[in-house]
Image (tube, rainbow, N blue to C red):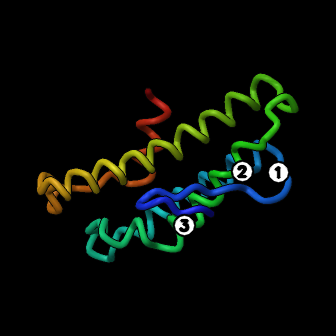
Amino acid sequence: MIETGENQVRFWKGDAGHPLKVSINLVELATNLYSDVIDENGTLDIENAFISAPYDDYLDACCELVQVNLEQLNKSQKIAFFLNIYQCMYVHYFLLKVKDEAMDNEYDQSSELPSVCSIHQIIMHS
């Protein structure tokens, strides 16, 4: 990993796994990340989300995407792969959006957070 100010450049070391396994692993890591940043009261702990071990693990695993070989997938598998990646991107986007709103003091902690299941439903119906 190379650090450049606030940005980090990460690289995947080694060979990439099978694309579907890589995408499923990312979904699991994104789900764990989202679940880990919500406390027992349902409050999003956005301050610690981006310095947590699950977030770091998620970013490391994302680096593997650069090396996956999509040519080994059939059409249905490619659709599954990209839906999985889209789901991960949505969870990441949601966390970044909440972080930005919190920094702008626009985020209402009392509002109900979407569950991982509702995020799944939103993605599947988009």
Residue type (three-letter) at the residue carrying disc 1: Gly
Q: 126 and 15: which one is in front?
A: 15
Tell me what residue is drawn at x 83 percent, y 58 percent: 14
Instruction: Report x, y in % for residue 44.
Output: 29, 66
Identify the disc placed on residue 17: 1
Taking the image as shown, residue 19 lies to the left or right of residue 51, namely right
Compared to residue 125, the image places residue 61 above or below, namely below
Tell me what residue is drawn at x 19 percent, y 58 percent: 103
Q: CA distance from mark 1 to mark 3?
A: 19 Å
In terms of sequence position, does the residue under pointer 1 or pointer 2 come before the other?
1
List the residue tagged with mark 3: 56
Residue 85 sits in quarter: top right
Taking the image as shown, residue 71 lies to the left or right of residue 43, namely right
Tell me what residue is drawn at x 41 percent, y 65 percent: 50
Residues at circles 1 and 2 in contact by the CB criterion of under 8 Å: yes
Instruction: Report x, y in % for residue 77.
Output: 76, 32
Residue type (three-letter) at the residue carrying disc 2: Glu
**Camera-side mark, 1 or 3:** 3
Residues at circles 2 and 3 in contact by the CB criterion of under 8 Å: no
Identify the disc placed on residue 64: 2
Q: Neighbour class for label 2 at 10 Å: few (<14), some, many (≥20)?
A: many
Q: CA distance from mark 1 to mark 2?
A: 8 Å
In terms of sequence position, does the residue under pointer 1 or pointer 3 come before the other?
1
User: In terms of secondary structure, where does tag 3 sit?
Assistant: helix
User: In terms of secondary structure, where does tag 1 sit?
Assistant: loop
**Image quarter hosting the C terminus:** top left
